Amino acid sequence: MKLTLEALEALDAIDRHGSFAAAARALHRVPSALTYTVRKLEQDLDALLFDRRGHRAVLTEPGRELLREGRHLLAAAGELECRVRQVAKGWEAELVIAVNDLLPLAPLYATIGQFYASEGETRIRVTREMLSGCWDALADGRADLVVGASGDPPSGGGYRSEPLGEMPFVFAVAPDHPLAGAAEPIPRAERVRHRAVVAADSSRRLPARTVGLLSGQDTLTVPDMAAKLAAQLAGLGVGFLPLHLVQPELAAGRLVVKALEEGNPGEPLCLAWRAGHRGRALGWFREWLAATDWRARLPPPRPSG
């Protein structure tokens, strides 16, 4: 390859400083060396890159195109150098955090903001998972840390976890749904006669699971909790929803909470990661998230009446 980062750096410096001499001073090189670098590049590319007729070195059209794209390469090379230095110090190049779709993202975003303000170049990627998909993301390598894993971890061990608390649910129906006027507590035999809205398990390899679904009950499967809420608002089915998610709809009268014969289940959630992961970014987030009371950062209940 005839194009080098050194040559691109020379072009960038000449364009920014306006002359070969000024660019050479900025790069701590002698002007003759810089002139040789540019002429060699022009010969290799068979293109005139600078118009040297005036007092300033002015890029030609081929030179502008080369520098426009070349600056992306220089920036990428600089970022790569920083990431390599970070990895050498024990920081991951990238940390993937999967968040249970039951949980809001705002508390995590606040923590990510603290990480950006205090730490280095580790790239953060946030994904969403549901039900068994949380553990599956760890087992499949799609995530390094899961916020809100629920249910049992995969067999065979190799995972670590810390409890985050229990997510409260309510059984909610649209005001015009037949169950809205049903006598309480609603027995299972009555509930099974009505379609349930189910958020799809995002697991790819582990067995999928459901929560609060009765055997033989008709289902409408939707992609996530936001879609499940929308479907229940539309009266297409019934089901359990996280209390924090449904509170605005209850306050506005768009949904009605119904008591069940068996009560409302809670979902224990935890912070989970692979036992062999020792990166410093993972450790930082584990420490901060484990110390965060996520329940205190959910939307507060609205007063009734």
Image (cartoon, rainbow, N blue to C red):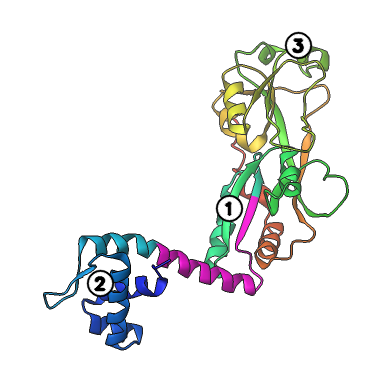
Judging depth in this view, the residue of 83 and 116 nearest the camera is 83
Q: Residues within 10 Å of mark 1 (few under 14, many from 20)?
A: few
Dot 1: what SS?
A: strand
Q: Nearer the viewer, residue 228 or 143?
A: 143
Residue 142 in sight in this render: yes
Total of numbered circles in the picture? 3
- Identify the mark at residue 15; answer none if there is no mark: 2
Q: Which of the 4 image quarters holds residue 227? A: top right
Residue ID at (69%, 54%): 144
- Mark 2 and mark 3: Cα distance apart in space: 74 Å
Which residues fall within the magenta stretch?
73-97
Amino acid type of disc 3? Arg
The numbered dot on residue 193 is: 3
Q: Earlier in the sequence, mark 1 or mark 3?
A: 1
Percent from the top left, x then y, of residue 204?
72, 37
Q: Quadrant of the N terminus?
A: bottom left
Q: Residue at x 68, y 62 (%)?
A: 282
Left or right relative to 273: residue 21: left
Residue 18 location (% of width, % of height): 21, 76
Position above or below: 165 against 189: below
Q: Gap in Å between the C-alphas at discs 1 and 2?
A: 36 Å
Q: Looking at the picture, which amino acid does disc 1 mark?
A: Arg
Task: Tell me how far mark 1 sits from mark 3, CA to CA.
Answer: 42 Å
Determine whether label 1 and label 2 are within 8 Å by CB.
Answer: no
Q: Earlier in the sequence, mark 1 or mark 2?
A: 2
**Is 74 within the magenta?**
yes
Disc number at residue 125? Answer: 1
**Which amino acid does the dot numbered 2 rest on?**
Asp
Q: Nearer the viewer, mark 1 or mark 2?
A: 2
